[in-house]
Image (spheres, helix red, strand yellow):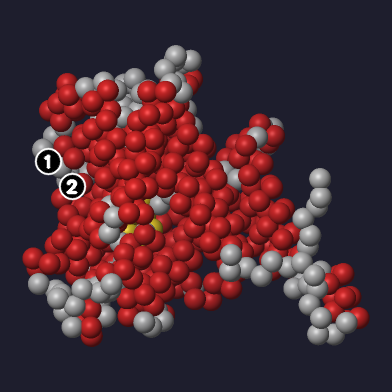
Amino acid sequence: MADTSIGTPDQLRDPNYTPPLHKAIPLGIQHVLAMFVANVTPAIVVAGAAGFGFGSNSADFPELLYLIQMSMLFAGIATLLQTVTVGRVGAALPIVQGTSFAFLPVMIPLVAGKGIDGLAALYGGIIVGGLFHAALGLVIGRIRFALPPLVTGLVVTLIGLALVQVGIQYAAGGVPAKASGAAEYGSALNWSAAFVVILVTLGLKFFARGMLAVSAVLLGLLAGYAYALAVGILTPEAIAGSWNNAAAFALPDPFRYGVDFTIAAILGFCLMAFVSAVETVGDVSGITKGGAGREATDREIEGATFADGLGTALAGVFGGLPNTSFSQNVGLIAMTGVMSRHVVTCGAVFLIICGLVPKVGGVIRTVPIEVLGGGVIVMFGMVVAAGVSMLSEVEWNRRNMVILAVSLSLGLGLQLEPQAVQYLPETARVLLTSGLLPAAFLAIVLNLVLPEALADERSSAQTAPGVRPMPLNTPEH
């Protein structure tokens, strides 16, 4: 519900309105709280896949701190591009940018088990993919037809399905513990920490209001953190050591991990940029509709896409991960009724400050993997739910059911059984085992080439004009 004490109804719907600073700053920090955990999680997942994440005992483990730092810094910078704008770059709307989950199914195969040596190819793909993403701003309005809810819903669902395994592994004790055969992997103690996070998150989400509900995942993690301290999963000495070893201030380091331009990485990131661009179009439309009661203009959509891509490319230069608009903040604008882009600018400045202070990342790095697992289970499950919600808009005739069935079977099957394509060249293997790209490509192609009605449906329609064909029945077992 809109808070009229902040301004008049017309002011609240105006992106250019600046509320009083003592009210704008808390509202901006509220936006940061809503996305904070989701923003740093992809860096933690990538580090874990590469082999220097939580519990790895890798000599490169300190590099995780830098990845977390860059996630915060460039989320803030990319958000500033959206709110303040630079020429045609930016939508001049309250769009919050953050590290994207969507690219994880592409990033994980690229870095799997390679340590920091695998990051050069990753960042080559991020830089080129970001520039390609920015270029899509020139044509985004003309290619939306290729990505109806059937395709975008399938893609978002697969993103979540590709990641839910990560949440379970984290909650049980982490991938390194599993690989080493550690006895504590899957123990009741590990799971209890994850369940504390889940229970507190759900309790706040459903029974609290305002800031408590908006920041439910973050507060759930804090509760899990306190529980881990109480039961001995985490020690005060570990926290103090991480805090003391982190610098009070540090600037980003360009090309810290080198850069390598590989076909697999470039193709993967460019294809995912296409999907991410359309997701941003949806978020921009949601902001203008929910906050101002109007449709987004072409200028706003183009500017948002430019900022998305350039923010990603810039992050890639300094060791950040791909950025995109955060949908949870779209809902926050609709809930508060405050459309001011300057409120989000305050949040962006807060993120930038956090990104320049490694001690913030040092504290995040001490979060036990089991505690993070509880939060990740909730977040990745919500990604699946968002995809299912998008699919609910589809008219489920036989044509669309066939497209979904074939695309989902291929994509999910290749994720679950990557050895099925072990004899293909490395580039093809990386792209296919992401699962997401072959599924999205197949769904787009089938949606464009298949007739609107299958042969038997056309025949039925011709035989009995005006009668809709019966839906496809579920086979009996």
For the N terminus, the image quarter is bottom left
Q: Position of residue 116 (x, y in %)?
A: 38, 31
Q: Position of residue 277 (x, y in %)?
A: 46, 64
Amino acid type at image mark 1:
Phe
Q: Nearer the viewer, mark 2 or mark 1?
A: 2
Q: Give the spatial CA distance, label 2 vs label 1.
A: 10 Å
297, 127: nearer the viewer: 297
Marks 1 and 2: in contact by CB < 8 Å?
Answer: no
Q: Residue at x 46, y 46 (%)?
A: 380
In the image, farthest residue toward the right: 463
Left or right: residue 314 compared with residue 355:
right
Residue receiving disc 2: 354
Q: Position of residue 222 (x, y in %)?
A: 25, 39
**Is residue 471 at least partly visible in the picture?**
yes
Q: Residues within 10 Å of mark 1 (few under 14, many from 20)?
A: few
- Residue 232 location, quadrant: top left
Amino acid type at image mark 2:
Cys
- In this picture, is 324 found above or below 126? below
In the image, farthest residue toward the front: 207
| Label 2 SS | helix
164, 414: nearer the viewer: 164
Residue receiving disc 1: 249
- In this picture, is 181 found above or below 65? above
218, 69: nearer the viewer: 218
